[in-house]
Image: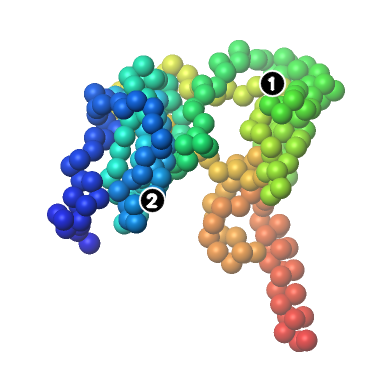
Amino acid sequence: MAMSDARYKLLGGGQYPSECDEDAPVPPALQVPFCRCEPGNQLAEVKQSRHPKTAGRAFYICKWNDSLNPCHCLFFQWIDGPDKFDPRIRLFPYYRSESWAYNEFRRWVPPPPNPPPMTEEEKQEAAIYRVNNPPKCHCGVRAKLQRPNIGVPPKFTPFFRCSLKTRDGWPACDFNEYIYGPRSHWPIEEEVREFESGKKPWPCTTTPSLRCKRGILATKGVVPSELGYRYYCGNSYEEYWVHILTTKLKLLMILSLC
């Protein structure tokens, strides 16, 4: 349904700049502002720009900033000036609809440089050493080796993850390294040229790949055990789901007879 002119103006239409306006004013550091949503006590939240002209700069925006949400207003205010411009942030995926309360916002930090290429022999030697001498994660504890392979040939390379868990079972930090050494985070120069030429979309236009609690890439498809189409652990395979479904059906049959 189209928005009326009165409603558009009430929500701040035409009164605020946008993420692409690199010359818009940057006010001095003040208390977190309120957006234009009713009843007028909604604190604005923070995002970092991925626009080519303003990449890396933080700004305030309505917490209901998802364009599909009819409740959001058009409030916008820069936090950072042009000195925070960092186009490297566009080389990595992110969740476009996510924003953060000011006290929870953490700026994007560039990942470490890609490790030098290794031969298969070097990988084997490094893997043997690291199994006996596990690396420390960001929490400062020895990381735990994950061997997420089912079936032959192996689907995944073993990797180290944080050995500490949060209350809901997720790793306490985002440490993630292959058994033989750190992962490559940055795209290669040829890929960057393809982004700049338009042959490939910029990574910032995509969202990060979903992973399960063990750090394995998720697979999207039919999940019989949940009777729906959704994401599930990519380490699972057909017989696993058949077993789960059979078990649940048996349980339902037993309950129906009680």
In the figure, 122 relative to 44: above or below? above
Residue type, numbered disc 1:
Gly
Q: Marks 1 and 2, how far apart in space? A: 49 Å
Q: Quadrant of residue 90?
A: top left
Does any portion of residue 128 appear in the rendered image?
A: no
User: In the visual, does 47 lie left or right of 16?
Assistant: right
Q: Seen from this angle, which residue lies furthest left? A: 5
User: In the visual, does 77 lie left or right of 156?
Assistant: left
Neighbours of disc 1 within 10 Å: few (<14), some (14-19), many (20+): some
Q: How is the image coloured?
A: rainbow
Q: Which mark is residue 181?
A: 1
Q: Give how far across and how far down residue 226 sits, in percent.
A: 61, 64
Q: Give how far across and how far down residue 76 sits, in percent.
A: 30, 38
Q: Give how far across and how far down residue 80 sits, in percent.
A: 37, 25
Does any portion of residue 110 appear in the rendered image?
A: yes
Q: Seen from this angle, which residue lies furthest bottom? A: 257
Q: Residue at x 37, y 39 (%)?
A: 33
Q: Where does label 2 land, which residue?
A: 41
Residue type, numbered disc 2:
Asn
Q: Give how far across and how far down residue 73 sits, in percent.
A: 30, 49
In the figure, 153 relative to 50: above or below? below
User: In the visual, does 244 lie left or right of 185?
Assistant: right
Q: Secondary structure at mark 2?
A: loop
In the figure, 190 relative to 101: above or below? above
Q: Quadrant of residue 126?
A: top right
Q: Quadrant of residue 158?
A: top right
Q: Residue at x 72, y 33 (%)?
A: 162
Q: Which mark is residue 25?
A: none
Q: Residue at x 39, y 27 (%)?
A: 29
Q: Earlier in the sequence, mark 1 or mark 2?
A: 2
